[in-house]
Image (tube, coloured by chain):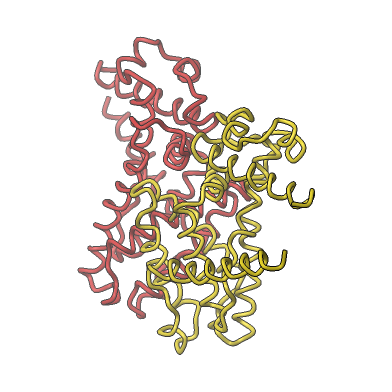
Chain colours: A red, B yellow
Amino acid sequence: MARQERAIKTRKVILEAAGAVFDEHGYTATTIAMVLERAEVTKGALYFHFPSKESLAQAVLDEQIPRGAVPPQPCKLQELVDITFVFGQRLLNNSLLKGSVRLAVDQCAPPGVDHSGPYRQWADHLVLVLEQAAAQGELLPTVEPRQTVELLVGAFAGIQLMSRALTDRADLAERISVLWGHILPSVAVPGLLTGIDRSPDRGVRVLAGIEETDADEAELDLSRR
Amino acid sequence: MARQERAIKTRKVILEAAGAVFDEHGYTATTIAMVLERAEVTKGALYFHFPSKESLAQAVLDEQIPRGAVPPQPCKLQELVDITFVFGQRLLNNSLLKGSVRLAVDQCAPPGVDHSGPYRQWADHLVLVLEQAAAQGELLPTVEPRQTVELLVGAFAGIQLMSRALTDRADLAERISVLWGHILPSVAVPGLLTGIDRSPDRGVRVLAGIEETDADEAELDLSRR
């Protein structure tokens, strides 16, 4: 592996370990030593990438959007729906995302860590998708994309929280489906409503497609060496 | 004051102090000593009411519903809307509620504290209001009251969280108004839609009415002595 490639891999290993530790213990109780033990990297490697616990937390917080990608859809509202289901599905077993969401939600982080970041980043990201939907004539004329995406981001944050508290997120996909069932009629033009797939297993199906593509690309990557 | 009355007042003072300390420091960092100092009561008085930090946290968590009362309305959907606006408004300056919400949202509380309580209690409370709305013919036939109230509770939790992170809750009433703007058309029969008041200052106005009533009752109470 080239040096840069190795550095990227190490950074990823550290982030994943940090996400897991933040998820289990929260910001305050997490120590660099705990992350080191989980990541099985040297102290020097960790401090090379992250000079402090704050910077580690900030990097974990900033990972949500890059990990929220889904395949583009001709219907942009469907793509928006997919983003929520895929993120919900990933929250079930991705420790980095779990830790990131806990950091955004807990009040424990010190002033140096901007835990409002994910809310703003998600809204900025999703508003582009909703504006594309508007440009394609998918939205009712009453929709103000910024208001709608901020509602979605806030509501999603709370729904995953409630699902975590009640069922350790086992019913999260059901709850996301109910959210869309209530919101779509106020957002989509009537002709689109029945065509948008918001069944609870949507996330599993979209994710299966993504992972196949990832595996194909990895294979391609390997055959190139 | 009779002895029982004094005990009720002391319990209230302790709960309010505990709410404030939990709000500022979170569960883990809060100590009984901090609550004692804030409440200005004796150690004996505190332990008489709350034998442990867990029991104190549990009592703070259980205060949300009793403090969510609003005047009954002929239109039950309006009453439901009012509950959300009034709770949002109270969250701005009621330390006990702020602390209670932080305990429900933070993952820090130990297994002994049931921080899923407020989600279930709110849903159980609100479903009764929505069922009354159904009985009065206010709801579309597609509405399943339990699903809708669980969505409302989860979405509200996240919306207040996002509002806290971005504006220290200054825009919470606006966000609650946007939530209802998106949800009501999927819930209410069309004839009711324009009649339901969901303007952002709804909470302030309803609360002004409640406080007048409270003041009147206190006066009446005093004149009886």
State whether residue A184 appears in this view.
no
- Residue occupying the far right of the picture: B3
Residue at the image position 77 percent from the left and 37 percent from the top: B48
- Residue occupying the far left of the picture: A135
Q: Quadrant of the N terminus of chain A?
A: top left
State whether residue A68 appears in this view.
yes
- Residue occupying the far bottom of the picture: B191
- Residue in the foreground of this view, choosing between B121 and B89: B89
Residue at the image position 43 percent from the left and 83 percent from the top: B193
- Residue in the foreground of this view, choosing between B32 and A82: B32
Q: Quadrant of the C terminus of chain A?
A: top left
* Left or right: residue A183 compared with residue B111: left
Residue A111 against residue B211 in the figure, above or below: above
- Residue in the foreground of this view, choosing between A165 and A195: A165
Residue B100 horizontal/vertical position (percent): 57, 47
Residue A134 against residue B115 in the figure, above or below: below
Residue A65 horizontal/vertical position (percent): 33, 44
Residue A80 horizontal/vertical position (percent): 35, 59
* Left or right: residue A223 compared with residue B77: left
Residue A142 against residue B65 in the figure, above or below: below
* Left or right: residue A165 compared with residue B85: right
Residue A174 horizontal/vertical position (percent): 55, 59
Could you tell me how many numbered marks the image carries? Answer: 0
